[in-house]
Image (tube, grey):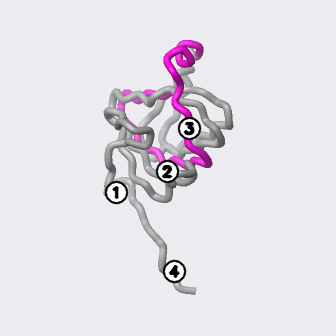
Amino acid sequence: MALTTRQIFNASDARFVPDDRYGEPVDGMWWCNISYDMATGLGSFLLRMDPGTSSKPHEHMDYEEFYVIDGELVDNDGAVFRTGDFVSFGPGSKHWSTTDQGCTLAVFLRRANRRLGDDERRNLE
């Protein structure tokens, strides 16, 4: 069987573009789409966050999992995810993350996340 649709991505030289998955790009967040389908919210992508960047508060509508390729990510509850960590968030979990040093993640989504409103974010603080 010939493999005609294989793609190979290397985080060190992949083409990252502004992260506009939810409309307006998030400053300091970049992504490289591997298999992510905007219509279904299913698929995989690489995500790079510049030093000092924060993700927008969101709720996971299904599982979101990621592998930390490099750097460090800190969740709003203080949990620290370091190079080599594989993190799994279950449906209904709500959070946001920040990075002081920057990081690169391999992200696996089963459904698009839902952005939280300001009032919902305050409930998480």
Q: Amino acid at mark 3?
A: Asn
Look at discs 1 and 3 and give the one toward the viewer.
3
Q: Position of residue 116 (x, y in %)?
A: 53, 25
Q: How far apart, in angstroms, are the residues tagged by discs 2 and 3?
A: 11 Å
Q: Which residue is mark 2?
A: 38
- At mark 2, the secondary structure is loop
- At mark 4, the secondary structure is loop
Q: Quadrant of the C terminus?
A: top right
Q: How far apart, in angstroms, are the residues tagged by discs 4 and 3?
A: 32 Å
Q: Which residue is mark 4?
A: 3
Q: Position of residue 101 (x, y in %)?
A: 36, 32
Q: Which residue is mark 1?
A: 14
Which residue corresponds to the image point at 35% horizontal and 37% vertical from the top-left?
25
Q: How far apart, in angstroms, are the residues tagged by discs 2 and 1?
A: 20 Å
Q: How far apart, in angstroms, are the residues tagged by discs 4 and 1?
A: 21 Å
Q: Earlier in the sequence, mark 2 or mark 3?
A: 2
Q: Residue 113 got which mark? A: 3
What range is drawn magenta here? 96-123
